[in-house]
C-alpha cells in the first residue's frame, strides 16, 4: 500500500520551512557562492554519479572515484546510491505504465515530483536490480547510512562559518548563515532533480518515438546539468552523453570528458548511430 509517512517525512518539510530564515540571517556573497557551488557539485554527483554511472553504467571509473561520487551524491540527502539507481532502473523498465512508481502520466504531478520519494512502500533497496555495484561493502554501508554525508556537510559548514566569522570577518558570514544556505542548496537540489520525473515526461519536444512520454526540455537540462534531454535518454539510455547534438547543452558530459582526459573515468559510451538517423 502506498502511504506517505508524514511524521517520518517531517525533516523534508522542515528543511523547506527553514529556508524562510533567510530573512533573519541574510545573504552574504560568500554564503550565496557556497550555495551555488554545493548545488553544482552535488547535482553533478547525482547526474553523472547516481544516474549515468550507477543506474546506467554509461562509463567506467575506479573503485575510489565511484565512492567519491556516491558520497557526494548522498550529501544531497536523496537517499543512497544503490536505492536511487535501483529504483531508476525500475522506472526505465516500466516507464509511464501503471507499474512506474513516479509517472506523471499515470499518476499526477505531486506524486511524480516528490510523493513517491516520501512513500514508505519504496523504502527498501531492490539490490538484485543494481548488481554488480551492490557487491561493494562500502557502497552498501553508504546506502544504509545515507544520512551521514549530509550531516557531516552541515557540521562542516557550521564549523567553517564560525571560523570565518572569527578569523576572516571580511567574508561577512557565520556558521548559522552558511548552514542555512547549504540547506537552501539542498532544497533546490531536491526540486531540480525531481523535475526530471514530474516535468520531463509532460513538457518539451519529442524527437524519438519511445514507449513512454519522455520529452526534451532545455530549461530542465540547464538546471540538472544535462538531464533535460530526457527523450534522448529514453531512446538510448546507455549513452553517457544525453545532449546528442552540439546545441544540446550537457554540462555533466563536458565534465566527464574532461575527467576522461585526466584518466579519472574512461570508456564513455557514445550515442548509437541510430540516434542521428532522424
Image (cartoon, helix red, strand yellow):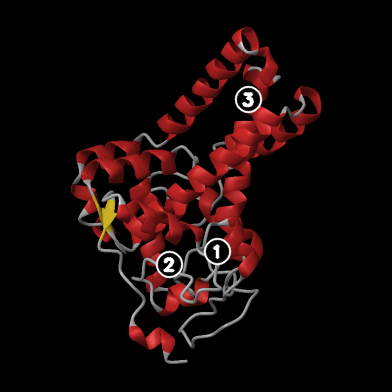
Q: Residue at x 72, y 27 (%)?
A: 28
Closer to the N terminus: mark 2 or mark 3?
2
Q: Residue at x 22, y 44 (%)?
A: 63
Closer to the N terminus: mark 2 or mark 1?
2
Q: Dot 2 corresponds to which residue?
A: 91
- Residue 9 percent across, percent down from the top left: 57, 40
The nearer-to-camera label among 3 and 1 is: 3
Which circle marks residue 87 in the picture?
A: none
**Most distant residue in the front direction:** 261
- Residue 150 percent across, percent down from the top left: 48, 32
Q: Return the residue nearer the eye: 70 or 110.
A: 70
Asked if disc 3 and disc 1 are in contact, CB closer than 8 Å, the reply is no
Asked if disc 2 and disc 1 are in contact, CB closer than 8 Å, the reply is yes
Q: Dot 3 corresponds to which residue?
A: 178
**Most distant residue in the bottom direction:** 278
Q: Residues within 10 Å of mark 1 (few under 14, many from 20)?
A: many
Q: Dot 1 corresponds to which residue?
A: 197
Q: Residues within 10 Å of mark 3 (few under 14, many from 20)?
A: many
**Most distant residue in the top direction:** 166
Q: Residues within 10 Å of mark 2 (few under 14, many from 20)?
A: some
- Cα gap from disc 3 to disc 1, whole angstroms: 30 Å
Q: Can residue 172 be seen by looking at this rendering?
A: yes
Q: Return the residue nearer the eye: 19 or 72.
A: 72
Q: Please identify the quarter of the rendering in which residue 89 is found.
A: bottom left
Circle 3 sits in a helix, a strand or a loop, which is it?
helix
In the shown orientation, is residue 199 left or right of residue 77? right
In the shown orientation, is residue 56 left or right of residue 156? left
- Cα gap from disc 2 to disc 1, whole angstroms: 10 Å
Q: Can residue 183 be seen by looking at this rendering?
A: no
Amino acid at each position: 500500500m502506498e502511504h506517505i509517512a508524514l511524521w517520518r517525512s517531517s525533516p523534508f518539510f522542515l528543511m523547506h520551512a527553514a529556508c524562510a530564515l533567510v530573512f533573519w540571517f541574510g545573504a552574504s556573497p560568500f554564503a550565496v557562492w557556497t550555495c551555488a557551488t554545493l548545488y553544482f557539485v552535488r547535482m553533478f554527483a547525482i547526474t553523472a554519479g547516481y544516474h549515468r554511472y550507477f543506474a546506467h553504467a554509461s562509463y567506467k571509473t575506479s573503485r575510489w572515484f565511484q565512492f567519491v561520487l556516491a558520497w557526494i551524491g548522498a550529501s544531497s540527502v536523496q537517499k543512497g546510491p544503490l536505492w536511487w539507481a535501483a529504483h531508476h532502473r525500475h522506472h526505465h523498465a516500466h516507464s509511464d505504465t501503471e507499474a512506474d512508481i513516479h509517472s506523471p502520466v499515470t499518476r499526477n504531478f505531486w506524486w511524480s515530483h516528490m510523493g513517491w520519494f516520501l512513500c514508505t512502500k519504496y523504502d527498501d533497496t531492490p539490490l538484485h536490480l543494481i548488481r554488480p555495484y551492490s557487491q561493494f561493502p562500502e557502497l552498501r554501508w553508504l546506502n544504509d547510512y545515507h544520512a551521514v554525508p549530509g550531516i557531516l556537510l552541515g557540521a562542516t559548514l557550521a564549523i567553517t562559518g564560525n571560523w570565518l566569522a572569527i578569523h576572516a570577518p571580511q567574508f561577512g558570514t557565520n556558521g548559522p548563515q552558511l548552514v542555512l544556505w547549504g540547506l537552501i542548496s539542498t532544497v533546490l537540489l531536491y526540486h531540480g532533480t525531481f523535475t526530471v520525473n514530474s516535468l520531463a515526461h509532460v513538457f518539451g519536444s519529442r524527437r524519438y518515438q519511445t514507449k513512454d512520454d519522455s520529452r526534451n526540455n532545455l530549461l530542465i537540462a540547464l538546471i540538472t546539468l544535462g538531464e533535460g534531454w530526457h527523450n534522448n535518454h529514453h531512446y538510448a539510455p546507455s549513452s553517457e552523453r544525453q545532449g546528442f547534438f552540439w546545441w544540446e547543452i550537457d554540462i555533466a558530459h563536458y565534465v566527464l570528458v574532461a575527467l576522461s582526459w585526466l584518466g579519472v573515468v574512461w570508456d564513455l559510451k557514445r550515442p548509437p548511430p541510430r540516434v542521428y538517423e532522424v
